[in-house]
Image (cartoon, rainbow, N blue to C red):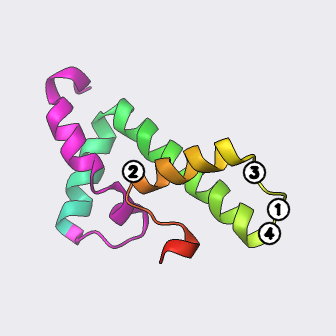
Amino acid sequence: MTNHHTHSSRCHELMTQISMYIDDELEAHLCAELERHLADCVDCRIILNTTQKTIELYRRHYRLGSVALPPAIESRLRQALADAGYTSPGDE
């Protein structure tokens, strides 16, 4: 297994592509490179899985018209999604 600390700059570089990967918009060769990295890097797999779950919860919230999130939580969620390269439905 890859030592995360020795590859932290590589992890960061690949994780900047995570939103395109999740949206199936990443070029095939980059997608394959990211998947090879994910196979060996537990930390990056955790980031990917957490990001995917967060996006799904966010989308489900808006799709179902659920009860509004408390403002502080919604603000943190919007910021996390923006940091991951996503925009909210009203920002597009």
- At which x and y percent is residue 83? 39, 50
At 20% from the left and 62% from the top, the residue drawn is 30
Q: Which mark is residue 69?
A: 3
Distance in Å between CA atoms under marks 3 and 1: 8 Å
**Quarter-of-image position of residue 25:** bottom left
Kind of element beneath mark 2: helix
Query: Of the numbered discs in the image, which one, if any, rests on residue 64?
Result: 4
- The reply to whether dot 4 and dot 1 touch (C-beta < 8 Å) is yes
SS type, badge 3 = loop
Residue 4 at what x, y percent from top left? 25, 25
N-term-proximal mark, 2 vs 4: 4
* 10 Å crowding of disc 3: few (<14), some (14-19), many (20+): few
Amino acid at dot 3 = Leu
- Quadrant where the N terminus sits is top left
**Residue drawn at (73%, 72%), measured in percent from left and top?**
63
Q: Secondary structure at mark 4?
A: helix
Amino acid type indicated by mark 2: Asp
Q: Magenta segment, which residues?
A: 1-28
Residue 44 figure quarter: top left
Q: Quick one: which residue is furthest to the right in this view?
A: 67
Spatial CA span between label 4 and label 3? 13 Å
Judge left or right: residue 83 versus residue 79.
left
Amino acid, disc 4: Leu
Task: Say which residue label 2 marks.
Answer: 83
Tag 3 or tag 2, which sits nearer the N-term?
3
